[in-house]
Amino acid sequence: MSIPAQTPSPFMLTPIPPEDGPKLPKPPAGKVFDRPPEVTSRAKKKDIPEGMWTRCKDCGEMITNKELETLFKVCPKCQYHFSCTAKERLAWVTDEGTFEEMDANLVSVDLLKFKGVAAYTDKLKAYQKETGLKDAVITGFGDIEGHPCGLAVMDFGFLAASMGSVVGEKITRVFERSTKKKLPIVAICASGGARMYEGMFSLMQMAKTSAALARHAQANLPYIAVLTNPTMAGVMASFASLGDVIMAEPQSMIGFAGARVIRETTREELPKGFQTAEFLLERGLLDMIVHRKQMKSTLASLLEFMA
């Protein structure tokens, strides 16, 4: 039985014979499924000039240095408090033109002839050149919203504000002179602890500063301690923890030994937030946590009340 041939539909496309069609180049073998080359822009991003921006260590926000200065070096997004110098703190806290520095020319001496990776005298010279300070604390007298007081402001940028003979002597002198002048004292503390390069001479400063504060307290004169990030070891174990009012900046690390040393000694896991200002406020070591931009007004209010 023969099958009749189908009548071609008018809508069917007639295939073009190969010889009549367009000549298309054949793709090379193995290249059919390769990804096409990425198109990259030749335009280069403009380089950001160095020294104009700072990245927040906590949230990663990029902040112009000019804006950061107007915000007391506090991140506008997460309120992280950047480290700052003693001179900056004095400018923020005291009334303009009122601060008079004392004992500015006291310089540390290498009594032990300490030798390590670098000699103590070499380290002192390097930090003096870098910070423009003779040592890790600035002391003197000034006004805070019209209230005269003795001031001791530590600078962590100078050998981690470690307390050696000069630091202890300058702090003791401003305590004693404030007692003699019947003035309150404000100490803004930041330190990694005692200065190992001076050995026992450094440890003696703990007793010396504490004794000067005891005489100040006997005269019924107020003492306010401000703890910043970090305030540790010998400084925390002496004058930093003896304030009639003890306040701290947010998120400051405060304690004696470091968390790792404590963990290895006790063989226990430490609680969350251990040694932070917020942790210590909850447990009664601190009286208050004060934002940096409110520090001056808070100190003025306390001085007015306590005086």
Image (cartoon, rainbow, N blue to C red):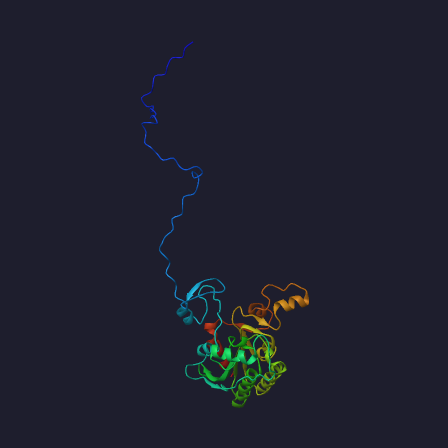
Identified at 60% across, 75% down, the residue is 233
How many numbered circles does the render carry?
Answer: 0
Query: Residue 145 in the image: x percent, y percent?
Result: 44, 81
Q: Is residue 212 above or below residue 233?
A: below
29 or 58: nearer the eye?
29
In the rendered image, the vertical position of residue 294 relative to residue 200, given as above or below: above
272 relative to 105 in the view: left or right: right
| Residue 118: % across, % down | 56, 76
User: Residue 155 placed where, x, y %?
Assistant: 51, 77
Specify the quadrant of the image occupied by residue 146. Answer: bottom left
For image coordinates 53% across by 80% down, the residue present is: 124
Task: Identify the image quadrant of the N terminus.
Answer: top left
Residue 149 spot, x, y in % from top left: 49, 84
Front residue of this view, candidates 293 and 57: 57
**139 vs 77, nearest the viewer:** 139
The furthest residue to the bottom: 180
Viewed as shown, does residue 207 lie left or right of 188?
A: right
